[in-house]
Amino acid sequence: MDCKTKKELKITACKIRMGIIEAVHSAKSGHPGGSLSISDVLAYLYFKEMNIDPKNPKMENRDRMVLSKGHCSPGLYSVLANRGYFPVEDLKTFRKLDSYLEGHPDMKGTPGVDMSSGSLGQGISVATGMALAAKLDGDAFRVYSIMGDGELEEGQVWEAAMFAGAKKLDTLCAIIDNNNLQIDGCLADVNSPDPIDKKFEAFNWNVIKINGHCFSEIEDAFNKARETKGMPTAIIMNTTKGKGVSFMENKAAWHGSAPNDEQYEIAMAELNSAMEELNK
């Protein structure tokens, strides 16, 4: 990846993070921690990786993305807004009465949302079904699904993994946000799904482990996923929950808490400072 592209992606990821903070603060509720940790991969997916068209959200041959951890909708909405699916200003209506930006993604009401999600474990199952349908119909589109590491505690995840591996769904790519924190605390203290890589490998998946905040590694992982035939790919991203906002980083308390006015100002000041540095 050249320096110009990397810089552009970093700027986009920073804009996504600003949108997340704006949305959650405005709603006085939501899930900033896990939204911030996937901002980099969202920037890469929607601005470089996927075949999509904001002017034609239902384009038949578009790539699909299912946010399996649907509570991180602020991240999805922010990237969709920045990509041009709807106005960035509308992020301020998040979770408001009559807003089309609901607490969890709604495919019927929000442009760019390929699947309604929220019940953990179900998103990857739907993505698996999409990939199977594409294979049966001879379609070439790819299917991506972002999952939380705590979500891997759901049994349905492994039923989908077993099925996808058995059916050799090589257009399917699962992205695991491995930030090691969930709503009740550290993953290891709640119900650790480790070793995540060995589990996916056992179900005949191609497994790639990366730093989820390094665009060079993200690009390399998706390129390898495209080249892999005969098996789905699981990209396990080592990430930091709350990435980009210092007082939210690595704090389980920010899994589902909104910043107050003072915290909002601090967070936005940090992100604006990061943006100014990137634009030098």
Image (spheres, grey):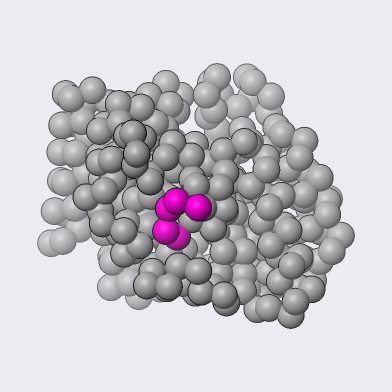
> From the viewer's perspective, is 67 left or right of 273?
right
Image coordinates for residue 197, horizontal then vertical, percent = 71, 47
Eyeballing the image, is 264 above or below 105?
Answer: above
For the point 33% across and 34% down, the residue is: 97
Front one among 69 and 36: 69
Q: Is residue 16 visible?
A: yes
Residue farthest front in this picture: 98
Locate the N terminus and report the quarter of the image it occupies. bottom left
Image coordinates for residue 226, horizontal then vertical, percent = 63, 73
Eyeballing the image, is 273 above or below 27?
Answer: below
Image coordinates for residue 229, horizontal then vertical, percent = 75, 74
* Residue 110 on the magenta segment: yes
Residue stretch in magenta: 108-112
> From the viewer's perspective, is 257 left or right of 266?
right
Q: Is residue 178 visible?
A: no
Locate the C terminus and report the quarter of the image it occupies. bottom left
For the point 50% across and 47% down, the residue is: 106
* Residue 149 on the magenta segment: no
For the point 23% across and 23% down, the residue is: 260
> From the viewer's perspective, is 20 left or right of 59?
left
Eyeballing the image, is 105 above or below 134?
Answer: above
Corner quadrant of residue 62: bottom right
Image coordinates for residue 185, horizontal then vertical, percent = 53, 21
For the point 57% across and 38% down, the residue is: 118
Instruction: Name the dominant secondary structure of the magenta segment.
Output: loop
